[in-house]
């Protein structure tokens, strides 16, 4: 599986899927644009363990598409549903657990 790092400023490049088997990582600037969250809120998500950016060889943090999806979920929970940080952490962790249990159930049913 190869990795690529996006520094492009073109909005259309942000939404294009990576080629099969390739993971694309985004800079903080692009991540803030894609999630509509400020750098401080993104850093808070990193501090509490909601996202884990990649930090290649002393470069700035890079965020995966999975991180982008989680950050968008955080934005929705805070801005649209009015949850505080404690509520956001609980909801995100419980939905992660629910997804893992669904996957395990599907695996056991096969």
Image (spheres, rainbow, N blue to C red):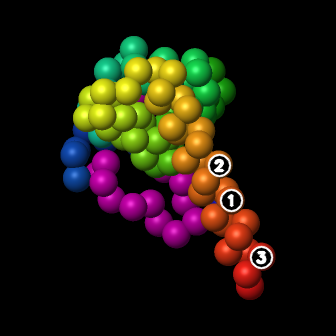
Query: Where, by quadrant of the figure, is residue 71 drawn?
Result: top left
Question: What's the residue at 55%, 60% (across, down)?
Answer: 22
Name the foreground residue: 105 vs 35. 105
> Is residue 78 rendered magenta in the image?
no
Q: Is residue 69 above or below residue 43?
A: below
Q: Please rate how many residues cluster around mark 3, counting C-alpha atoms within 10 Å: few if below 14, some from 14 to 19, many from 20.
A: few
The residue drawn where x is 40% and y is 41% is 73
The first of marks 3 and 2 along the sequence is 2
Q: What residue is disc 2 on?
A: 97
Q: Position of residue 60 (x, y in %)?
A: 52, 23
Classify mark 3: helix, strand or loop.
helix
Residue under label 1:
101
Disc 3 from disc 2: Cα separation: 16 Å
Cα–Cα span, label 3 and label 1: 10 Å
Residue at horizontal 39%, vertical 14%?
A: 40
Identity of the residue furthest to the right in this view:
108
Q: Earlier in the sequence, mark 3 or mark 1?
A: 1
The circle drawn on residue 108 is 3
Question: Residues at badges 2 and 1 in contact (C-beta under 8 Å)?
Answer: yes
């Amino acid at each position: 599986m190869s990795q690529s790092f996006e520094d492009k400023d073109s909005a259309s490049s942000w939404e294009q899927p990576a080629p099969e088997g390739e993971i694309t990582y985004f800079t903080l600037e692009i991540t803030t644009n894609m999630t509509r969250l400020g750098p401080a809120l993104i850093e808070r998500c990193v501090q509490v363990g909601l996202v884990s950016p990649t930090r290649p060889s002393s470069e700035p943090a890079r965020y995966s598409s999975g991180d982008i999806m989680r950050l968008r979920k955080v934005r929705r929970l805070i801005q649209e549903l009015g949850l505080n940080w404690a509520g956001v952490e609980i909801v995100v962790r419980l939905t992660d657990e629910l997804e893992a249990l669904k996957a395990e159930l599907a695996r056991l049913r096969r």
